[in-house]
Amino acid sequence: MVESRWLRWVGPGVIALGAAGLIAATTSGAAARPWTPGACAGPPGVLSPVARDSRPGNLADLASVPWFRQDPVVDGGGDLRGQRVAIGLDGDRLVRSMDLPAESFAAGPFGRIVLVRIR
């Protein structure tokens, strides 16, 4: 069998060009995804009344807005021992707090709900 020296010189270049061509062919159709829904319903530039005026209507509206605060609980060496979560309503003096394990978290508010995950 005869050895072809030109194949050893040209072979890697042909493989590299083929790989670059394959990548270019697959990414050339990577435009906007038509299956992704639009971010907002309605014509662009039209804001809902809530987005136009973000201030509360009156002081009574502030009393129903929930909030939470999550603070880490650390020991003297700086190791995380847990989480302390405080939950309340704006304008209300009553604050509920709880100590949670270190892996727990809080998220929200979603409407009038604060989600607390206890691990």
Image (cartoon, rainbow, N blue to C red):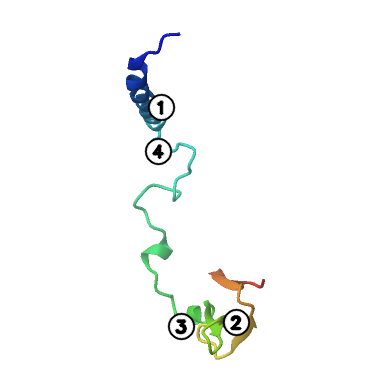
Quadrant occupied by the C terminus: bottom right
Of circles 3 and 2, which is in front? 2
Q: Which mark is residue 22?
A: 1
- Calculate the distance from the C-alpha at mark 1 to the C-alpha at mark 4: 20 Å
Read off the residue under disc 3: 59
Read off the residue under disc 2: 81
Please state which of residues 63 and 98 is positioned toward the viewer in this rendering: 98
Give percent across and percent down for residue 112.
58, 72
Q: Residues within 10 Å of mark 4 (few under 14, many from 20)?
A: few
Q: Residue 32 is drawn in which quadrant?
A: top left
Q: Which mark is residue 32?
A: 4
Of circles 3 and 1, which is in front? 1
Give percent across and percent down for residue 99.
63, 83
As shown in the figure, which amino acid type bears the numbered disc 4? Answer: Ala
User: Disc 3, disc 1: CB below 8 Å?
Assistant: no
- Calculate the distance from the C-alpha at mark 3 to the C-alpha at mark 2: 39 Å
Q: Is residue 113 in sight in this rendering?
A: no
